[in-house]
């Protein structure tokens, strides 16, 4: 199973960007998908995750710093997760990574990168004034 994140780039403060994460190598949709980010000199940070049941999000969680601005979603037909990022701030600058797992995770595990069975390469997002 491979995850490929793309869609990063340079955006102005207050702007929007949508990241995509394509899952390949699986015949069924993952039970959980998530986004993390890592800024220079900082630890990897949880951004958002959703447990999925069928075609709908069963449970969704966001990191405190992105609540109300970022939205995680998924297109099952394309086996792709998205992260819509609005009202971007300079502190959102980071490499963004996607992660997934075959089954849903318990809510206590969603925030932890190493709990995900599949973890992808990152895409750089730079927010500048």
Image (cartoon, grey):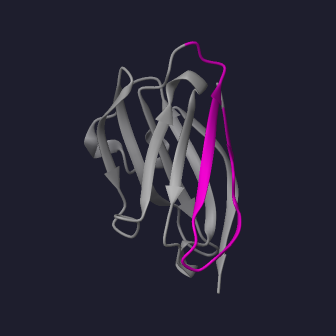
Can residue 20 be seen in this snapshot?
Answer: yes
Membership of 13 in magenta stretch: yes
Q: Is residue 91 left or right of residue 124?
A: left
- Image point 51% across, 25% down: which residue? 76
Between residue 112 and residue 100, name the one nearer to us: 100
Give the quadrant of residue 96.
bottom right
Q: Which residues are magenta?
A: 3-27
Q: Is residue 110 left or right of residue 113?
A: left
Q: Residue furthest front?
A: 15
Q: In the picture shown, does residue 32 fall above or below 93? A: above
- Image point 53% across, 78% down: which residue? 89
Query: Which percent across, then down, holds residue 98?
Result: 57, 45
Give the quadrant of residue 80.
top right
- Image point 36% across, 20% down: which residue? 54
Query: Which percent across, then down, holds residue 86?
Result: 49, 65
Query: Which percent across, then down, holds residue 28?
Result: 51, 15
Q: Residue furthest bottom?
A: 129
Q: In the picture shown, does residue 76 fall above or below 66? A: above
Query: Which percent across, then down, holds residue 78?
Result: 60, 26
Give the quadrant of residue 38.
bottom right
Quadrant containing the N terminus in the rendered view: top right
Q: In the picture shown, does residue 75 fall above or below 6? A: above
Membership of 4 in magenta stretch: yes
> How many marks on residues?
0
Quadrant containing the C terminus in the rendered view: bottom right
Q: In the picture shown, does residue 106 fall above or below 11? A: above
Can residue 104 be seen in this snapshot?
Answer: no
């Amino acid at each position: 199973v491979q995850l490929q994140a793309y869609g990063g780039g340079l955006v102005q403060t207050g702007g929007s960007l949508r990241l995509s994460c394509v899952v390949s190598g699986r015949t069924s949709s993952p039970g959980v998908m998530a986004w993390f980010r890592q800024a220079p000199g900082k630890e990897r940070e949880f951004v958002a995750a959703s447990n999925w049941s069928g075609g709908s999000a069963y449970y969704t969680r966001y990191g405190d710093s992105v609540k109300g601005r970022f939205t995680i979603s998924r297109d099952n037909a394309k086996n792709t997760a998205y992260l819509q990022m609005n009202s971007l701030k300079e502190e959102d600058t980071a490499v963004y990574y996607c992660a997934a797992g075959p089954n849903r995770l318990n809510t206590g595990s969603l925030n932890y990168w190493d709990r995900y069975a599949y973890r992808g390469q990152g895409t750089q997002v730079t927010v500048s004034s």
